[in-house]
């Protein structure tokens, strides 16, 4: 069986995608996988290990070039957002990127680990739907409410299947970008789940989230709970480590979730394993440097010093305006010095005995 799979990554993070690729190949031994890696900057010379892995399993990797500058004319991503424009390459997937012979494709992401066989989902009957994806039961409430507000259906991008031939017949690229304009108007930025949720309204077929895909991050842990997440890990086909602006991932464990140990089980076998470890140290060191910078600029002493300086300046100005003279100014400065000394002493006591 041929299985077409889509994954997007770039030179900055492609080494972390090795775990997704390795676990995909290992857990789908009966399929001949054509993995289409969509990227703005990857070259074949970057993927020596990945091509060797594909050959070992009788699979194929094809790089599809994605023009980030062209996409940037349509896609709106905030400068401080952790999503690069390249993650929206799926807008061009059906009409400009995929070869004509591809009639259906399954989407995974680079921050995932595949833990089950995907053939049941890949071979599912679309029954007139344009897309098949995990049900909305795992999506945060604010996500579901937003989709209802703008008149679309909830779509989960990871582990979604698309009827490429039918989409090509019924939609143009311009139709996709028109829906993106609606999303940008309401959300303030582009978001592929919102866009396709609008485009495929009433034509999305759902499979149970518990047996297909589970997201693990801070929000999902709080909303779904530890016990439910653990149960899903026993039945799901894929675990997705989605994140927010803190960019918490298995290789950057800002917030620990149960599935990280599964990712690292595959990571140990990766040729990049040593680099995962060493880059994690660098990420941690960078975070500590940022914390130190914050402490240096927003510290108890700095704030207290600025407050006292401004207070002294204001009071001394008032002394001059009200003709209090040098005696008044000296009294203000003396009171400020006394207040500063008393504050530092109280702070010292609170730290020592608090």
Image: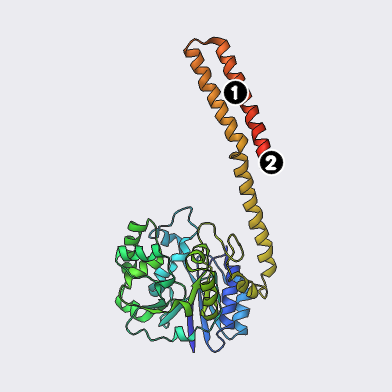
The residue tagged 1 is 336
Determine whether, in the image, residue 165 is placed left or right of residue 295. Answer: left
Determine whether, in the image, residue 278 is placed left or right of residue 224. Answer: right
Judge depth for marks 2 and 1 and give the one in front. Answer: 2
Determine whether, in the image, residue 65 is placed left or right of residue 199. Answer: right
Point out the tag, 2 or 1, that comes first from the N-terminus.
1
Q: Eyeballing the image, is 314 above or below 192?
A: above
Work out which residue is located at the far front of the displayed protein and give it: 353
Query: Relative to the observer, which residue lies in front, 237 or 80?
Result: 237
Quarter of the image with the C terminus is top right
Query: Residue shown at 65%/56% (left/top)?
Result: 284
Q: Is residue 259 visible?
A: yes
Determine whether, in the image, residue 181 is placed left or right of residue 106. Answer: left
Query: Residue shown at 31%/74% (left/top)?
Result: 171
Q: Eyeballing the image, is 74 above or below 294?
A: below
The residue tagged 2 is 353
């Amino acid at each position: 069986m041929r299985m077409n799979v889509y994954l997007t990554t770039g030179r900055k993070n492609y080494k972390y995608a090795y775990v997704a690729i390795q676990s995909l190949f290992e857990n789908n031994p009966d399929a001949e996988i054509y993995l289409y890696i969509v990227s703005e900057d990857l070259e074949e010379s970057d993927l020596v290990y990945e091509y060797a892995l594909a050959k070992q399993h009788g699979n194929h990797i094809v790089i599809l070039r994605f023009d980030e500058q062209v996409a940037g004319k349509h896609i709106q991503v905030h400068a401080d957002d952790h999503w690069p424009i390249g993650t929206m390459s799926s807008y061009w997937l059906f009409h400009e990127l995929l070869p004509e012979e591809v009639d259906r494709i399954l989407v995974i992401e680079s921050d995932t680990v595949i833990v089950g066989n995907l053939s049941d989902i890949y071979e599912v009957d679309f029954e007139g739907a344009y897309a098949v994806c995990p049900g909305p039961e795992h999506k945060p409430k604010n996500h579901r409410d937003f989709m209802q507000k703008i008149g679309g259906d909830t779509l989960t991008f990871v582990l979604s299947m698309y009827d490429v031939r039918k989409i090509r017949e019924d939609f143009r690229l311009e139709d996709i970008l028109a829906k993106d304009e609606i999303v940008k108007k309401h959300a303030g930025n582009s978001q592929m789940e919102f866009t396709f949720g609008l485009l495929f309204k009433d034509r999305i077929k759902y499979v149970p989230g518990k047996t297909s895909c589970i997201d693990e991050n801070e929000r999902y842990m709080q909303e779904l709970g530890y016990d439910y997440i653990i149960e899903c890990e026993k039945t799901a086909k894929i675990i997705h480590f989605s994140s927010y602006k803190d960019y918490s991932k298995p290789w950057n464990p800002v917030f620990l979730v149960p599935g990280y140990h599964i990712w690292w089980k595959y990571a140990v076998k990766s040729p990049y394993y040593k680099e995962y470890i060493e880059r994690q140290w660098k990420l941690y060191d960078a975070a500590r440097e940022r914390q130190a910078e914050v402490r240096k600029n927003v510290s108890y002493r700095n704030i207290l010093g600025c407050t006292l300086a401004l207070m002294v300046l204001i009071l001394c100005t008032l002394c001059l305006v009200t003709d209090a003279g040098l005696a008044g100014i000296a009294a203000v400065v003396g009171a400020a010095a006394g207040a500063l000394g008393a504050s530092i002493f109280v702070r010292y006591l609170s730290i020592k005995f608090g």
